[in-house]
Image (cartoon, coloured by chain):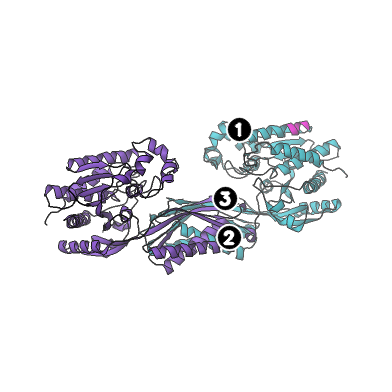
Chain colours: A cyan, B purple
Amino acid sequence: MDVKVNIERMRNDLEELGRLGRDEHGGVSRPSFSPADFEARNWLRGKIERAGLCYRQDGAGNQFGRIDCPGRTVMAGSHIDTVPNGGMFDGAAGVVAALECLRRILEEKVPTARPLEVASFTDEEGNLVGDFLGSRAFMGMLDENEIRKGRTSFGLPFEDILRRTEFTADGILGAHKDRPELEAFLELHIEQGPVLEDEGLSVGIVERIAGKHYRQCSFVGQASHAGTTPFELRHDAFLGLADFALKATQHVATKHYGSMLTVGRAVLHPGSFSIIPGRADFTLEFRSSSEETLRVLEKEIFAIAEDVASTRGLGFASRVVDRTTPVVVPSRIVKIIEEECESLHTPWMKLTSGAGHDAQILAGACDVGMIFVPSPDGISHSPAERIVWEDLEKGANLLLRTLVRLAT
Amino acid sequence: MDVKVNIERMRNDLEELGRLGRDEHGGVSRPSFSPADFEARNWLRGKIERAGLCYRQDGAGNQFGRIDCPGRTVMAGSHIDTVPNGGMFDGAAGVVAALECLRRILEEKVPTARPLEVASFTDEEGNLVGDFLGSRAFMGMLDENEIRKGRTSFGLPFEDILRRTEFTADGILGAHKDRPELEAFLELHIEQGPVLEDEGLSVGIVERIAGKHYRQCSFVGQASHAGTTPFELRHDAFLGLADFALKATQHVATKHYGSMLTVGRAVLHPGSFSIIPGRADFTLEFRSSSEETLRVLEKEIFAIAEDVASTRGLGFASRVVDRTTPVVVPSRIVKIIEEECESLHTPWMKLTSGAGHDAQILAGACDVGMIFVPSPDGISHSPAERIVWEDLEKGANLLLRTLVRLAT
């Protein structure tokens, strides 16, 4: 098969799409269900329809373009929403690559024996109520209470957001009913890390996708006057957090290298120059590509927190905000992608995805595979996110050949 | 001299005043220039006038009640503003005690040879533009730029606050012109710490008032994806802050016992579950009762910060927000108060004030002295702030005798 993607058309698509939601800091701010996201959805619908694909949108706003025939569907895609002030390739590269693959299959009348679909999933970035709203809806994995009563990351009730759109809680919860039987799901994505660039490679084949735990945690002590409370009488919740963060990071870095732990947000109460913090609320996330390690990490990290709390006379509390399960990419998919790399004379490496992806959610229904292309300087979720067009071309050609293999 | 204060009248005054600005959490929220503060100012004016004292208010809103005669003034007082959701004794106890002393001197026609004044200073708590606005205005120690262009702790330009009041920047800056020649300033205050209660004493004589530095600081690293950035490539600004806070606290606690260091507020940027903090902004305050120690602390603490920054590949920046100088209470004042404790058969101890007080500012113009009464459980700046009336009575009688001594 000599069919190749048209990288000029892909570049043009990505540049068009990257102008929708362009913000004053030079980034792309296009969270799902924002006005910019609706512009982008219209843009994508137009592209799918003009390509001659059969367009549909489900109740959760997931968008699809299909080459129909009987049998189980081979799907490829990603997402077009972004974090606030994000970049123009995270997600978008995978949707445009999948769209281009299906366009080329139609244009060249490549014979296939299974239906093919490009998919763009709603709110992969989790700006609404948790990551992966769209792919979770597609899989019937949503928490009904979260959809009906949840609050978005920027504080508004989700139902207030929905009221301004064509979507409803019932529609989102009902999206699972419309999904096709799946043979496989493939996702091309920027790496969002430095490994491929360091290795001088244009593509990576993902072997595992890390799972993660998101927890909202607090150390609770006693607020008191910073000028009059001697150190030995303090119950400083912030120092508890500081102690915990250093010890837990050290523990993960030395005992579970390759796993991750991050404190990304902290709020001290009451939050004044001269008052010892009586409470420190913070986010804790930890990730691992092994389910067993995640279980062990959870136990060990909370033992560290309890130990810090009891040493410092503090309380510790935490609740789960979100969690995903690590995914092992089936070896048959890894093998097919490797073989297609060889046919294309494209050198590759296998790697683990530390970031979560819709493919991880789809893994509950079918075999999944992921192709990474390098992120220059490892930067993503930033206006400085870039892509090398030659890398994207190689990755998209690999996606195209893998799709055709799976659909034949 | 057998004149004694009327503790029932003082209690009644404090309970009346404590109802002004009472908030839904059971605390008192009466920041200067708030509607509740204006109610309290009217209340105080009424009390001063009904006592037969000569009332005046200066351009900074400081309120005074005077028993006039020729000579240098002996002044006593404190403040009636509170922190948000504070208690009903911090400041108020000192104003009511001074008022009661002057009332008793008038009522009993105690012969005095110097003018006496009760004073209530604006915004001791620093809710507007820095602590001690009123006493600093009285002393001519304000930063003109801060008064004309400053922003309040709750974000509004100070001039917007002023516009809703009878006060002006020119009036505040001009307050210094109206102040009397001072012989001495005495301030009764709750301890805001646990020492007197622990020692079972009703009064403490302050020997020193700690000075403090307020700084707004930042560690600056590199925001990146929490799932894809290996530990060895991270520049996590929060871990820099955590490391610094623990090391600096440890350093002060072990090398400069009695001095204080506190991180009271921290904001991480961008502040998301899955993004490594690229910047950690935080408040740093440190205090000492020795000017020399403050100087050494400043040097040592910033050496620790620079060391943490360079070890972790971060930047460190800080700017001074406020600073006060430690005060040594003149031995003649300490001696007079000690002698009056003896006459009253009231056991006492000498102690250092870790908290700042208007007396510290007035020390630039005259001899100052402070009398502490116990704070049950060391609690202040809280709805749980309390006082033992018998302690207040002993403290106020001591204030009364000391004032008469100084005015004779």
Of A370 and A274, the residue lying toward us: A274
SS under mark 3: loop
**Residue B93 seen anywhere in this rendered image of the structure:** no
**Cα distance between the residues tagged 1 and 3:** 27 Å
Give the amino acid at mark 3. Answer: Phe
SS under mark 1: loop
Q: Which residue is mark 3?
A: B273
Q: Looking at the picture, do discs 1 and 3 lie on one chain?
A: no
**Cα distance between the residues tagged 2 and 1:** 38 Å
The quarter of the rendered structure image containing the C terminus of chain A is: top right
The quarter of the rendered structure image containing the N terminus of chain A is: top right
Would residue B245 be found to the left or right of residue A394 on screen? left
Query: Pointers 2 and 1 in contact (CB under 8 A)?
Result: no
Q: Which residue is mark 2?
A: A297
Would residue A237 be found to the left or right of residue B199 on screen? right
Judge whether A10 appears above or below A49 on screen: below
Q: Quadrant of residue A33?
A: top right
In the picture as drawn, the residue positioned furthest to the bottom comes out as B255
Q: Quadrant of residue A13?
A: top right
Would residue B268 be found to the left or right of residue A22 on screen? left
Give the amino acid at mark 1. Answer: Phe
